[in-house]
């Protein structure tokens, strides 16, 4: 396997005795310990998925899409399902509270020819849960199981799900939920190690993810998610839980090369050197150019990048003014001038991402 990290390439080989059992979703063979890019609204669009795939992410997800918007043929929502050759294997993730609408949405998603369909049972945001969708489904495991069964029966593609530990501290029902979803026909399950009430606060609890993985009833791949901010955490969580795969979300924003860093560390025990600011600037330019090309509009492409601008240069001293300038940039010239100045001032400085908070 060849993993490229900026200008350095490493040829990595696992000894036969070290090989793990390959992970499969349906008939899709994902190899040993695949790394998943978590589905994130306003983040996992084309240009960011491309950057993560470039640095070793094995499985892509679209932004999550509303079932109601899909069946109403809302074009902005359907655009989120646009897939590209580099994406594969890739899933379209759908969410909703009405079983019939979710079934119809799954059929619409299937027509876009993803490799599998994922059900969002984990989003904790109020606008998603207020009608009982996303993590709101954790309040009704019976309905969650019925919905999953109906979707599995309605489509030919493999169906997976992503969820949380439970609704709150007093209802951590993930072991039961995992069994129910497996019984309903999902072919893999991703678990974020927080309850809905935690949102993204506190620390992810990987011990409960381990309980699911070690449940003798479970036979499908279990994918662990939550608080992976670099190779050291990835290895620690993997050893604690024994999961079949890891999913990285917020830790990849502003750091798409985290996938190559994690892979290299898991396979060799060696940490790759942090990127220089010049390396990071080049990646920002690449992602920005693809965003502009995809949106076919310079301003739209810049607006898409603002969340990433805020994350790409952590830990640099006296950087606040440069970050504000990037976030307020209105034209491509503004962005390029800011990036040129950043590279001039910090070019050879290495960016420490390992200790950056995901909050």
Image: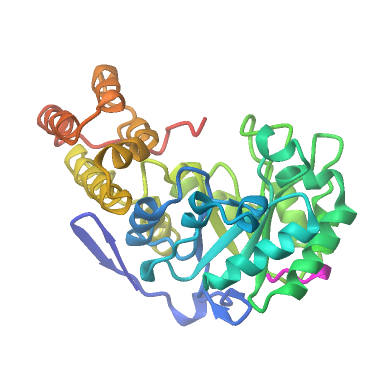
Give the residue drawn at x 63%, y 61%.
118
The residue positioned farthest toward the right in the image shown: 142
Q: Going by the image, does 273 lie left or right of 355?
A: left
Q: Is residue 290 above or below residue 263?
A: above
Quadrant for residue 339, please give it: top left
Q: How many marks?
A: 0
Quadrant for residue 185, please give it: bottom right
Q: Is residue 214 above or below residue 253?
A: below
Q: Is residue 267 above or below residue 225?
A: below
Q: Is residue 294 above or below residue 114?
A: above
Q: Going by the image, does 54 lie left or right of 79?
A: left
Q: Is residue 295 visible?
A: yes
Q: Is residue 178 visible?
A: no
Which contiguous range is marked in magenta? 182-187
Give the residue drawn at x 62%, y 51%.
69
Q: Is residue 22 magenta?
A: no
Image location of residue 209, percent across then percent down: 71, 52
Q: Going by the image, does 113 lie left or right of 135?
A: left
Q: Is residue 186 magenta?
A: yes
Image location of residue 163, percent across then percent down: 70, 51
Image location of residue 71, percent across then percent down: 65, 58
Image location of residue 106, percent across then percent down: 66, 65
Give the residue drawn at x 64%, y 30%.
202
């Amino acid at each position: 396997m060849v993993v490229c990290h900026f200008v350095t390439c490493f040829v990595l080989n696992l000894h036969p005795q070290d090989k793990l059992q390959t992970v499969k979703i349906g008939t899709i063979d994902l190899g040993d310990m695949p790394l998943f890019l978590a589905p994130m609204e306003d983040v996992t669009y084309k240009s960011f998925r491309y950057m993560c795939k470039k640095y070793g992410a094995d499985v892509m997800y679209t932004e999550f899409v509303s079932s109601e918007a899909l069946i109403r043929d809302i074009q902005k929502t359907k655009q989120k399902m646009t897939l590209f050759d580099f994406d594969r294997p890739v899933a379209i993730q759908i969410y909703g509270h009405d079983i019939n609408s979710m079934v119809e949405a799954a059929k619409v998603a299937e027509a876009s020819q993803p490799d599998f369909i994922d059900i969002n049972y984990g989003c904790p945001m109020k606008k998603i849960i207020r009608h009982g969708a996303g993590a709101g489904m954790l309040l009704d495991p019976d309905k969650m199981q019925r919905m999953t069964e109906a979707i599995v029966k309605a489509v030919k593609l493999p169906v997976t799900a992503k969820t949380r530990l439970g609704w709150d501290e007093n209802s951590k029902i993930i072991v039961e939920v995992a069994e129910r979803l497996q019984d309903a026909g999902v072919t893999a399950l991703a678990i974020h190690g927080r309850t809905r009430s935690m949102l993204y606060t506190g620390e992810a609890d990987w011990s409960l993810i381990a309980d699911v993985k070690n449940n003798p009833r479970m036979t499908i791949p279990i994918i662990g998610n939550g608080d992976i901010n670099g190779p050291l955490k990835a290895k620690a969580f993997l050893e604690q839980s024994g999961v079949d795969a890891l999913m990285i979300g917020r830790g990849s924003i502003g750091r798409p090369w985290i996938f190559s860093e994690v892979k290299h560390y898991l396979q060799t025990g060696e940490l790759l050197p942090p990127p220089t600011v010049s390396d990071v600037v080049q990646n920002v330019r690449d992602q920005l150019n693809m965003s502009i090309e995809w949106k076919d509009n310079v301003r739209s492409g810049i607006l898409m990048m603002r969340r990433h601008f805020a994350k790409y240069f952590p830990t640099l001293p006296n950087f606040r003014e440069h970050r504000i300038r990037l976030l307020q940039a209105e034209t491509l010239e503004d962005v390029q001038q800011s990036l040129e100045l950043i590279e001039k001032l910090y070019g050879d400085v290495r960016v420490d991402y390992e200790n950056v908070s995901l909050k």
